[in-house]
Image (cartoon, grey):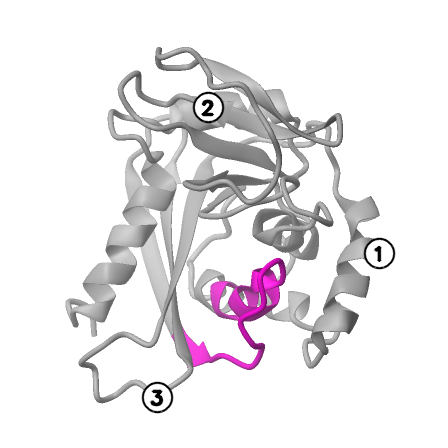
Amino acid sequence: MRDPYEALRLHRWDLTPAEARELQDAWREKVERRDRLGRIRRVAGADLAFDPPGRPTWRSGEALAGVVVFSYPEWTELESAFVRCAVTFPYVPGLLSFREIPAILGALARLREAPDLIFCDGQGFAHPRRMGLASHLGVLLDTPAIGCAKSLLIGEYREPPRRAGAWTPLLDGGERIGAVLRTRATARPMYVSIGHRVSLETAVAFTLEACDGPRVPLPTRRADRYVAEVKRGEYA
């Protein structure tokens, strides 16, 4: 995996929203939608939170990113890392990766060993400009990545059958941009899309492998809990 701090230098981050949209349009051609995985031994989940309440050591506008790494195929937790940093990009729908990725890269840089696959709590190719968080991060690091979101950003779909593993295509103007996946028979579906260097079918298969009962797959669910634990002061 490319050095996470080097990735910060692959494009400017002091962009206006208009410039950020132009960059997304240019970089969408960099997203690899076929499998180029290599050997998968370490799978990470990444999550992020802003402005934790009741923590006087945090500055306004600061972000917390957390990454948790699992062995594959055992799904044993191996390590975790977090970082706090200032947020420099405004909240603009469709441009959240510019706000979130610098913190996530900081957390990745604190791992002992880089992951071979990253699950992101957000969109990848299922984005108006096909460059959501998982795609942006995957291209920056040249690392396989999967977007696994709890809510719909764009697209239309038929409701998948109520059985675990069932999915239907997520479409935008007739283009297949993701999958609406039922990870648990009784739960609302997850919205899975390519991040980088994985096909949609492989992204769905990995997501199902990572599901151990709850609706949200283990990597992003554990990363979310880890960030909450850090916010409560459970880690120095």
Q: Can you say which quadrant of the picture contains the C terminus? A: bottom left
Circle 1 sits in a helix, a strand or a loop, which is it? helix
In the image, residue 222 sits, relative to residue 227, either above or below, namely above
Q: Is residue 129 left or right of residue 208?
A: right
Give the percent coordinates (x, y) of residue 92.
Answer: 58, 68
The residue at the point 37 percent across, 29 percent down is 210
Circle 2 sits in a helix, a strand or a loop, which is it? strand
Circle 3 sits in a helix, a strand or a loop, which is it? loop
**For the residue marked with disc 2, what is the amino acid?**
Leu
In the image, residue 65 sits, relative to residue 56, either above or below, namely above
Q: Which mark is residue 181?
A: 2
Closer to the observer: label 3 or label 2? 2
The residue at the point 41 percent across, 31 percent down is 72
Give the percent coordinates (x, y) of residue 188.
Answer: 35, 28
Q: Residues within 10 Å of mark 1 (few under 14, many from 20)?
A: few
Residue carrying label 3 = 59
In the image, residue 59 sits, relative to residue 144, either above or below, namely below
Residue 11 visible here: no
The residue at the point 81 percent across, 55 percent down is 25
| Marks 2 and 1 in Cβ contact (< 8 Å) | no
> Is 219 colored magenta in this rendering?
no
Find the magenta span and give its range. Answer: 84-104
**For the residue marked with disc 1, what is the amino acid?**
Ala
The residue at the point 27 percent across, 26 percent down is 212
Residue carrying label 1 = 26
Q: Which mark is residue 105?
A: none
| Marks 3 and 2 in Cβ contact (< 8 Å) | no
Q: Residues within 10 Å of mark 3 (few under 14, many from 20)?
A: few
The span from disc 1 to disc 3 (Cα, nearest Å) is 34 Å
